[in-house]
């Protein structure tokens, strides 16, 4: 008889960027519940405090820190701080992201570059800063949160979908670079998940979305967290460079 699936994250330190709310908060809760010490980040000091309080309420080890992934100095300062406070992470979940939607004809330089900076360059920065620690750790893990719109495209989101598609290329290339050091790099591509980001959509857009989802509902942040915690676990040790879609069947493109 074989053992049960090993989903335990006992003894692991997990960094989750953008852990204040929505999917990031669900991911940090799930990783903590599975045994990890979670370092969750927020853009503001109050957000970082709230993450710390949330972990403490659940009697989970870990802490909140301030981070702006669009600022190289902020990424550098975070890694310096966590190295001395807690230790470098062996699991990194690149979740932080922003949207500045507009049709291509009307998109400003600022809307384009701020989304690429946070959603794509931010992942490059955080992953690069984490690499040495990940390679030293046994079975390092990076999980990048992409999006179904990086796979299918979406009118009004050329900046966001370009960043999310770019993330898939980054994921596969980095997976090839670090595979020999037992570090896996995967992506999770959520569909439409019930968070602040989708609550900002107008009613007509939401209705159109629902019409295209075979499971006929928005996803829950917890359902994305389940996919992330699986990829972060020992059970996913032979999966790398992969994109796991969590989209209710919205896109089955493979
Ligand atoms: P959300 O509710 O808007 O939360 C975004 C998080 O990112 C917040 O914690 C925010 O921190 C943080 N953040 C924003 N800018 C940052 C920066 N420059 N540096 C560091 N952190 C920053 O988003 P969500 O809906 O949970 O989405 C989470 C991830 O899933 C994102 O990568 C998103 O693209 C992806 N996704 C979401 C959906 C969906 O339907 N919701 C679908 C597909 C993919 P503060 O609270 O401090 O601002």
Image (cartoon, rainbow, N blue to C red):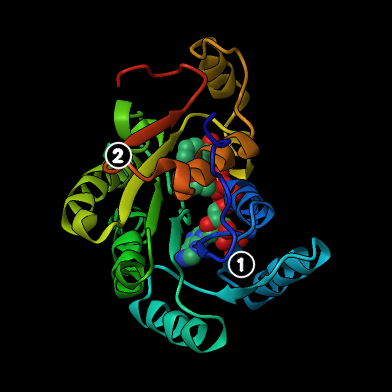
Q: Is residue 88 above or below residue 142?
A: below
Residue 142 screen position, x and y as percent: 38, 55
Labels 1 and 2: the sequence-earlier one: 1
| Picture quadrant of residue 90 | bottom left
Q: Nearer the viewer, residue 134 or 151?
A: 134
Q: Is residue 199 visible?
A: no
| Picture quadrant of residue 174 | bottom left
Residue at position x 71%, y 74% in the image: 49
Given contact means CB atoms under 8 Å apart, are the residues at marks 1 and 2 in contact?
A: no
Side of 122 where 35 appears, left or right: right
**SS at badge 2:** helix
Which residue is under mark 1?
A: 37
* Foreground: disc 1 or disc 2: 1
Residue 130 screen position, x and y as percent: 35, 71
Local crowd at mark 1 within 10 Å, few (<14), some, or many (≥20)?
many
Which residue is under mark 2?
A: 158
Q: Report how far apart the C-alphas of labels 1 and 2 lie in the structure.
A: 36 Å
Q: Is residue 19 visible?
A: yes
Q: Is residue 20 above or below residue 171?
A: below
Side of 55 where 71 appears, left or right: left
Ligand 1 is within 8 Å of the C-beta of the residue at disc 1: no
Residue at position x 39%, y 56% in the image: 141
Residue at position x 57%, y 66% in the image: 11
Q: Is residue 101 above or below residue 248?
A: below
| Picture quadrant of residue 201 | top right
Q: Is residue 66 above or below residue 212?
A: below
**SS at badge 1:** strand
* Quadrant where the image shows the C terminus: top left
Total numbered circles: 2
């Amino acid at each position: 008889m074989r053992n049960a699936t090993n989903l335990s994250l006992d003894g692991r330190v997990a960094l989750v960027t953008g852990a204040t709310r929505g999917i990031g908060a669900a991911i940090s809760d799930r990783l903590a519940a599975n045994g990890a010490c979670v370092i969750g980040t927020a853009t503001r000091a109050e957000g970082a405090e709230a993450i710390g309080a949330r972990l403490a309420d659940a009697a989970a080890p870990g802490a909140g820190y301030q981070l702006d992934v669009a600022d190289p100095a902020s990424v550098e300062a975070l890694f310096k701080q966590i190295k001395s406070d807690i230790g470098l992470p062996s699991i990194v979940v690149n979740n932080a992201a922003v949207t500045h939607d507009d049709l291509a004809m009307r998109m400003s330089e600022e809307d384009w570059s701020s989304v690429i900076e946070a959603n794509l360059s931010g992942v490059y920065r955080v992953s690069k800063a984490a690499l040495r620690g990940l390679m030293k750790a046994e079975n390092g893990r990076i999980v990048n949160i992409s999006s179904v719109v990086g796979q299918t495209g979406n009118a009004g989101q050329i900046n966001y979908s370009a960043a999310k598609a770019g993330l898939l290329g980054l994921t596969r290339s980095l997976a090839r670079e670090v595979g020999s050091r037992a570090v896996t790099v995967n992506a999770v591509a959520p569909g439409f998940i019930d968070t602040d980001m989708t609550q900002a959509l107008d009613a007509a857009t939401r209705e159109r979305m629902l019409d295209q989802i075979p499971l006929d509902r928005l996803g829950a942040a917890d359902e994305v967290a389940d996919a992330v915690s699986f990829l972060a676990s020992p059970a996913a040790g032979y999966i790398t460079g992969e994109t796991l879609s969590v989209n209710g069947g919205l896109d089955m493109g493979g």
